[in-house]
């Protein structure tokens, strides 16, 4: 069984992977060294297993591994249990999905959580399902949203201090984001914390009775009229948890609708990092990466805890790093949210010239905001603006890694742009709630994706590896001096963490849009990645989707280990 101690120590222990992020702080760093810059050239496949089925689409799942079993979620709300050593299929669960589900950005899932004897994941019809790890028998199910109103769920749950922590998707339909804490063994709700100002949070007593748990003194002050009621800020990429501060860090999506002229104000807590007390569900601090977002710059990117040496004072600070969809990399004090540093990690940014380190607010470029349709001649279409990054972001769902060995973040970034304009829109249950039109375009002929090694203290890009297609898979850093990541072209790569030099690669036969993991199995270091091209790019990518339409779908897990000579 998986205990709280197993989860607390996940980043340091090598025998399994029991949390999303290889430790709930989300560093995606492994202390293992058997596979290193010298030996990595001898990596060979150990096994591969297909998800089968007629339907494929994007596979974004991070495998979790415990007690010789690997649990991987797959497209269309499926979950597979494999023998971690041989790949033998142990069981599978296929969730029965209703016809009316409305995931905005492909039928993907990012992974499962482990606790006790259970494996738990979220489904596209906004449910949580917990199964016995050995048998696959369903232990409990809970509905977390109304799929007919656009709610879905794609993020991997995490376990924080014995609580199951989950988010919701649906921002493109005016769903209201929130973070829930449940008893992982029963599914019982312990607290719920909405991420749109104006909505009340609740705690539940022993009898399950609601106790109000709001943010005192604040009502929907940063919203106009009634728009907060359907205000988005979806927590669609889940959360990280830092045991040192007892805080859950949730990234929140764009405010709804996209047309920012309809909702003057900062629109809290959209496009933000929200730090929530794991015991009470109260918001302890928040930092808004894009106040009054008008570009769909969801701030759901993972907030990764790390120790930051202040370049001026030399003091070690408990910090967190976030490569935001809006193109800036933010470093905040994770005890109180104070901004320590902010710098661009993509080269072209048109909406703000910089982030003011004193006030913590962006220096907007006013011409960079799409125009108000109500100000136009016919009131139907606002001024079109050229904008970079595109709304798919300098970084999207693909997870970065942090190596305490190099002190660098490894950010799977994208350089692209869009034409974007606003249109009138009003809320209708179950209908897209954007009020915007757009086309995404490449900036450069030779690349969109670019893996960047970023120094959080100086903002310097230490090295970069360009990639033709947009990077959409996460990174893994190891004490072996390596960074692993996959490309939509199908290459899983092992590169030198210090220089970026590619030392090993393997073609998996379809695109990679998931983060690799590593663990030790019977004394051997194993490397695993889920494969299968998809996610938001082929659906929303405009000109970019056409440019990469040669990429083929798939659906499988690949596992590698060193060839014994
Ligand atoms: O606002 C939302 O609720 C929401 C949800 C999701 C999702 O659940 O995957 C994505 C987005 N927004 C989104 O804006 C986006 O770019 C995106 C990309 C992906 C993906 O997995 O490829 N999901 C999502």
Image: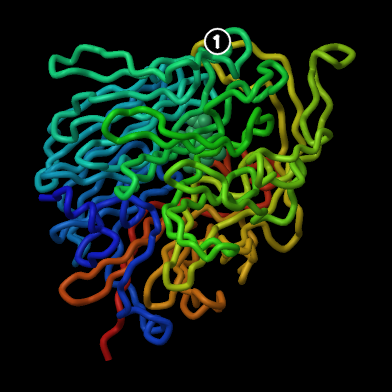
User: In the picture shown, does residue 299 fall above or below 206?
Assistant: below
Q: Which residue is mark 1?
A: 428
Which residue occupies the extreme top position in the image? 225
Quadrant in the picture for residue 279? top left
For the question of whether residue 104 can be seen, the reply is no
**For mark 1, does the 10 Å Cα neighbourhood hold few (<14), some (14 to 19), or many (20 or more) residues?**
few
Give the quarter of the image for residue 210.
top left
Decide if residue 395 is on the left or right side of residue 369.
left
Q: Position of residue 228 (x, y in %)?
A: 54, 15
- Helix, strand or loop at mark 1: loop
Q: Is mark 1 within 8 Å of ligand 1?
A: no
Q: Is residue 9 left or right of residue 465?
A: left
Instruction: Tell me the residue at 23%/24% (across/down).
Output: 189
Name the image quarter holding the C terminus: bottom left
Q: Residue at x 47, y 26 (%)?
A: 170
Q: Residue furthest right?
A: 377
x and y percentages locating residue 299 in the rendered image = 54, 38
Q: Residue at x 54, y 51 (%)?
A: 331
Viewer-closest of 348 and 508: 348
Tally of numbered discs:
1
Left or right: residue 11 compared with residue 200: left
From the viewer's perspective, tell me whether residue 468 is left or right of residue 403.
right
Of 536 and 358, which appears nearest the observer? 358
Q: Is residue 137 above or below residue 133?
A: above
- Which x, y percent locates residue 405? 43, 73
Tell me where residue 8 appears, x and y as whole percent.
23, 53
């Amino acid at each position: 069984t998986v205990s709280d101690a197993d989860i607390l120590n996940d980043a340091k222990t090598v025998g399994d992977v029991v949390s999303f992020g290889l430790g709930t702080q989300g560093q995606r760093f492994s202390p293992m060294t058997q596979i290193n810059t010298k030996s990595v050239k001898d990596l060979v496949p150990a096994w591969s297993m297909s998800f089968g089925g007629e339907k494929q689409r994007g596979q974004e799942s991070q495998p979790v591994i415990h007690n010789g079993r690997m649990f991987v979620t797959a497209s269309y709300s499926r979950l597979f249990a494999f023998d971690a050593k041989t790949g033998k299929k142990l069981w599978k669960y296929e969730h029965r999905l209703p016809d009316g589900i409305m995931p905005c950005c492909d039928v993907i899932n990012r992974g499962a959580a482990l606790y006790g004897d259970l494996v738990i994941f979220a489904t596209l019809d906004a449910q949580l399902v917990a199964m016995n790890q050995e048998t696959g028998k369903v232990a409990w199910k809970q509905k977390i949203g109304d799929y007919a109103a656009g709610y879905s769920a794609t993020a991997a749950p995490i376990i924080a201090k014995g609580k199951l922590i989950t988010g919701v998707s649906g921002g493109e339909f005016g769903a209201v984001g929130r973070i829930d804490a449940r008893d992982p063994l029963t599914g019982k709700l312990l607290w719920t914390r909405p991420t749109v100002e104006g909505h009340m949070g609740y705690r539940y007593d022993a009898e399950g009775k609601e106790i109000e748990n709001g943010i005192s003194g604040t009502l929907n002050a940063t919203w106009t009229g009634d728009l907060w009621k359907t205000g988005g800020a979806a927590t669609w990429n889940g959360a990280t948890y830092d045991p040192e501060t007892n805080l859950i860090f949730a990234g929140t999506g764009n405010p709804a609708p996209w047309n920012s002229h309809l909702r003057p104000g900062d629109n809290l807590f959209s496009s933000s990092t929200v730090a929530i007390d794991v015991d009470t569900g109260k918001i302890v601090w928040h930092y808004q990466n894009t106040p009054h977002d008008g570009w769909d710059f969801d701030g759901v990117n993972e907030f990764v805890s790390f120790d930051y040496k202040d370049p001026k004072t030399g003091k070690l600070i408990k910090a967190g790093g976030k490569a935001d969809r809006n193109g800036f990399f933010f470093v905040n004090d994770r005890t109180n949210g104070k901004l320590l540093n902010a710098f661009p990690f993509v080269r072209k940014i048109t909406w703000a010239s910089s982030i003011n380190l004193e006030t913590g607010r962006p220096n907007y470029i006013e011409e960079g905001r799409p125009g108000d349709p109500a100000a136009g001649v016919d009131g139907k279409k606002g001024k079109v603006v050229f904008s970079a990054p595109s709304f798919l972001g300098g970084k999207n769902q693909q997870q970065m890694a942090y190596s305490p060995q190099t002190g660098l973040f490894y950010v799977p970034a994208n350089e692209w742009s869009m034409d974007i304009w606003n249109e009138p829109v009003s809320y209708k249950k179950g209908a897209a709630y954007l009020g915007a039109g757009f086309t995404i375009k490449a900036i450069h002929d030779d690349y969109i994706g670019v893996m960047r090694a970023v120094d959080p203290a100086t903002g310097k890009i230490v090295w970069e590896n360009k990639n033709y297609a947009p990077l959409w898979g996460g990174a893994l850093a190891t004490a072996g001096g390596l960074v692993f990541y996959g490309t939509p072209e199908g290459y899983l790569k092992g590169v030198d963490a210090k220089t970026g030099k590619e030392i090993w690669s393997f073609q998996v036969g379809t695109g990679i849009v998931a983060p690799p993991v590593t663990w030790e199995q019977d004394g051997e270091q194993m490397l695993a990645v889920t494969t299968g091209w998809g996610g938001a790019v082929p659906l929303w990518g405009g000109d970019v989707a056409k440019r990469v339409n040669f990429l083929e779908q798939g659906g499988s897990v690949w596992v590698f280990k060193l060839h014994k000579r």
